[in-house]
Image (tube, rainbow, N blue to C red):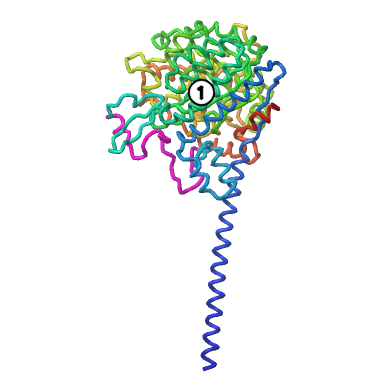
Amino acid sequence: MKVIVKVIALILVFSFNSCSENKGEKHQQKADIQKAQQTGIQKKIDAYVKVPLTADLSTLTIKQKKMLPLLIKAAQTMDALFWYEAYGDKEALLNGIKDTKTREFVNLNYGPWDRLDDNKPIIASFGVKPEGANYYPKDMTKTEFEKLALKGKDSLYTFIERNEKGKLVAVGFHQKFKEQLFKTSQYLMEAAQLAENRGFKNYLIARAKALQTDEYYNSDVLWMDMKTNHLDIVIGPIETYEDQLFGYKAAHEAYVLIKDMEWSKKLAHFVSFLPELQKNIPVSEKYKQEKPGTKSDLNAYDAIYYSGEANSGGKTIAINLPNDERVQLKKGTRRLQLKNVMKAKFDKILVPIAKELIDKSQQKYISFDAFFANTMFHEVAHGLGIKNTINGKGSVRKSLKNYASALEEGKADVLGLYMVMQLLDKGELKGDKKDYMTTFMASIFRSVRFGAADSHGIANMVRFNYFKEKGAFTRNANGTYVLHYDKIIQAMNDLSSLILTLQGDGDFEGVSKLVKEKGNIPLELQKDLDRLTAKNIPVDIIFEQGVRVLGL
């Protein structure tokens, strides 16, 4: 009896120890996986470098300084709206994430997908990001939408939802976000009471009303008419990058800006060259019949607040608005160069990239003046070319659907460089052409890192592969790139002609083919980009911003 008891006891001890060891191993494995995930998330967070958004406020009046907190409060309301457009219920998502670092990174991306890594899931269980973000029902097919006879279905300012009967309906932004937009409008109206500049005051009042009606034309026109205002705010549903299904739906965002009056004076005269440059762009006459507006503004600003779509993924360094083709043809556009953000990206990202990837003999041609000019004329070049197809297909934006933004960014890049070359020949710009072309090439490496989920990233990948085919550069054995300047000029002209033709024809299939063939990162280039990551060169920036950062 005692022997049996001892045997049983030994078996129990062995079993207990085995279970403990198995549980211990599983616990350790879980801990190791969690640690690896946290390390990976930390690396992704570290791919961004923090930059304080500050500016010289000494030139502002007392009332202007009182306006800034109100403008920032109005801008902050755009965050919640963009969260809903990009994902849905922000609080439910963040509250369900226990790991602090993962929650931080999800918040930075406005959802559980990594914007600078082709929208790959940050949390595996979320799977692929819906192409239509949260603008359309998840169970809606493209065919169902295209067959739908529904007023406002392709409006910039509607959600497509299913009603209680399962029927697709269009719901206006001003209806969906009624309470939030009322608050935004109140902040803008309060700011308007302090505005000393009549044009800015009128714009703020009109924009406050527009946010509550989704009728933006009048406020866009008033925004174009502002010439002497020191402060500015760009706010509302503007860009369509988030809608990758059709490219129809705009996303809410905001920028609060302080105008650099001295820099802006230097830039003002370049706009007068637009009609002449439009005549000379390298494409058949029928694709350049539209006349660009010459009332456009070209100004420099310091940005002091970003929110919503503007604050997600790769941060923009220049703005070209409004997007309404009616306003563009009547008034042109305003090009806003965000000087302080541009300088931060140049110093912290572009220069280190050039030192790693540009041939040593050509690194001397990297300059901030060239970076500023290339970026500036990228925005100006949005006004060149064509806005409406030549064959009755309607606007270029609607004809090219989800590829419209990427192709437009590609057009602005190559035509921007074209404008720089033309103005250098005319003596309107100073410097060596090699400065502008070398800095342009380094900028491709910078923007390619944004990935295929970003319109600017796609545009840069197409251009990189196209330029490579044309022999505009070659790769050295040590992984650096040497530029062939004459061939860059030819590649620039050829790609400009191709893009403008695709836009003018509204050739969706042609653009699809171009993106499919050239909108990808070759393995060799990816290895070079991986070197940048290994050397801890940031992919992009995130902001320390707000009233406290400004010292208000």
In the depicted structure, whether residue 314 falls above or below residue 285: below
| Residue 531, percent from left and from top | 61, 39
Span colored in magenta: 118-147
Dot 1 falls on a residue whose secondary structure is helix
Residue 200: name its quadrant. top right
Residue type indicated by callout 1: Ser
Q: Can you identify the residue that label 1 sits on?
A: 185
**Total number of numbered discs in the rendering:** 1
Query: Is residue 88 shown to the viewer in this render?
Result: yes
Is the stretch drawn in magenta largely helix, strand or loop?
Answer: loop
In the depicted structure, whether residue 447 falls above or below residue 195: below
| Residue 101, percent from left and from top | 59, 46
Residue 244 belongs to the span the image colors magenta: no
- Which residue is drawn at the image coordinates 54% and 76% (left, top)? 16
- Which residue is drawn at the image coordinates 45% and 25% (left, top)? 405
Q: In this view, does 375 lie to the left or right of 383?
A: right
Most extreme residue toward the right, as rendered? 58
